[in-house]
Structure formats: structure tokens, C-alpha cells
Amino acid sequence: MCDRALMYAVAAAALLATPAFAQVVDYSKYPAIMGQWDRQGPPNNWRQLGGPPPLTPEYQKVFAESQAEQKEGRPGNWPSAFCLPEGMPAMMNVYNPFEIIIKPDITYILTSHNNDVYRRIYTDGRDWPADPERTLTGYSIGHWVDEDGSGKYSVLDVETRFLKGPRAYEVTGIPFDTDNQTIIRERWHLDKADPNVLLDEITVIDHALTRPWGKAQKLFRKTDPRPVWLSETCPEDNVWVKIGDETYYRNVADGKLMPAYKGQPAPDLSYFKQPKK
């Protein structure tokens, strides 16, 4: 009897203790942005939506060189050609659909292009860390905003810092300053005229620019109850090879290295045993 009474007491204590540890989240106060989102139209649209990039003369030259290389068939200033993740803000171009997951202290953005990638947007009230590891996606802090005092959030303001390179805005090769001091600000909110449209208003502050530059990226809700997700592994079929400052092409048929443009010099073979003449 004593053992049974003790067992009941322990079980009762466990039941009483459960609410103290369980976290009940009222998702009705957040905007309905969880789920799968996709774009319409081309993803490389910075110039279409934001106008010509206000680049400094130095970085206008970098951009012009990238465009010239691409006319020759080379990737130019697009690091993701070598399987690097796009990083910020290019990953918000929505090359493939992404998923938004909201938790009270963090919002996740999950996507896959070249490789599976994600963003963490911290919404727990933290301050900027002193010296975090720099990444291609950066360190993002967000703040939920109740614009009309209704008790429900309508906007997510986000700032991203501590980015590293190499990165570009899109495949055309619009460059960032190599000092990696980029700051990216975003304002996420649903279109008031259509709750199935999400706007990501992006503003970039970077020393390669003469002024802040941005665009409003429009996203469209995918309503499939069982959405299909893409998962890409870029190294499986990538044909570009970067050696030193030169970019070469791997012939898919025989696996041999090929020049990427007419008259391209062969790579330095100093570390290979040379055949005797």
C-alpha cells in the first residue's frame, strides 16, 4: 500500500509540474507567414526592382569586368558557381521555394539552392555579440512590431551583420566591398491587399555603394497541403573549377580540364612531375 501511495504521489506531482515547464505559444498574435513561399518571375532582379546599382567607380569596374567575363562564357563575379551558398541577400532572391518557421525566440528560413541552407533570425531581445563568427548568411536580429496597437504583430524588422565574402547580389555579379562590413535591413510583412503575398523590403548598406540600395522582393504563398521540397547538392554536377585566379571547365564526357575561354593559359603544374623532353 505504501508503495502504491508513493507511486500515485509521484505521478500527481509530475502532472502538476508539467504546466510550469510547458511553453504555450499564442501563434494568433503573429502574422500568418509560416509555410512555403515562392517567387514569380526571374530571381536575378535587383536592377529591375531597385534600379541601377549605385556603385563606387572602383566597384563599377569590378561589375563591368564580371559582365565581360560572362559574355565569354565564364561565371564572372558569382561565387556560387563554385558551389558556395549564395549568402545574404542573394538567398532571399528565392531561387527555390523556402519555408518560414516561427518560434517566440527565433524565426527560421529554410531553403535549398546549390546546397541546403538556412537563416536564424533571433527575436529574443538579445544585443549584438561582440565578435561572432562571420558567415555567408550573417548574424540576424529581428523585432516583431505591432503597428496598430491591436496586440498582434504585423511586421518583422530584421538587421543582419557579421557577413563574410565572397558574395554577390545575383548571378550578374553585382559586387560587395571586400571589407565585409555589409549591413542588411529587412522589413517583412504581408500585403494588405492580398494575404497570400509576402513582401521582403531589403536595404543594403555597403562601402561598395555610394548610398543605401534596395528592392522589395515579392513572395507568393504555396498552398499545397503537402508541399514538395527541393534538396540540391551542387558538387554532384558542378563543372566549374577555380585554380588560382583562373576559372576552368570540367568536361562532363571525359572528366578532363578544359579552358573556359579562348587563349586561356593552362594552370601552373609546378607541383607535378613534368615529362622529359
Image (tube, grey):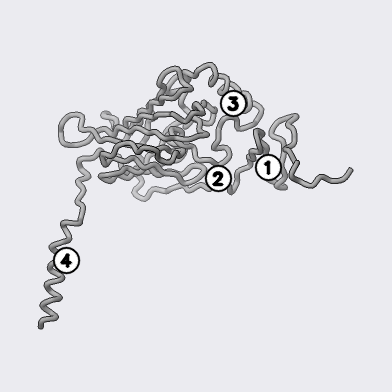
Placement of 220 over or under 208, stated as above or below: below
Task: Specify whether 195 is left or right of 133.
Answer: left
Residue at screen point 66% across, 34% down: 246
Separation of marks 1 and 3 at Cα, in angstroms: 21 Å
Of marks 2 and 3, which one's residue comes earlier in the chain? 3
Helix, strand or loop at mark 4:
helix
Task: Specify whether 254 is left or right of 53.
Answer: right
Q: Which mark is residue 14?
A: 4
Of marks 4 and 2, which one's residue comes earlier in the chain? 4
The answer to which image quadrant residue 89 occupies is top left
Residue at screen point 26% across, 42% down: 124
* Cβ atoms under marks 4 and 1 closer than 8 Å: no
Q: Which mark is residue 66?
A: 3
Residue matched to label 2: 234
Image quarter hosting the C terminus: top right
Residue at screen point 25% across, 44% down: 104
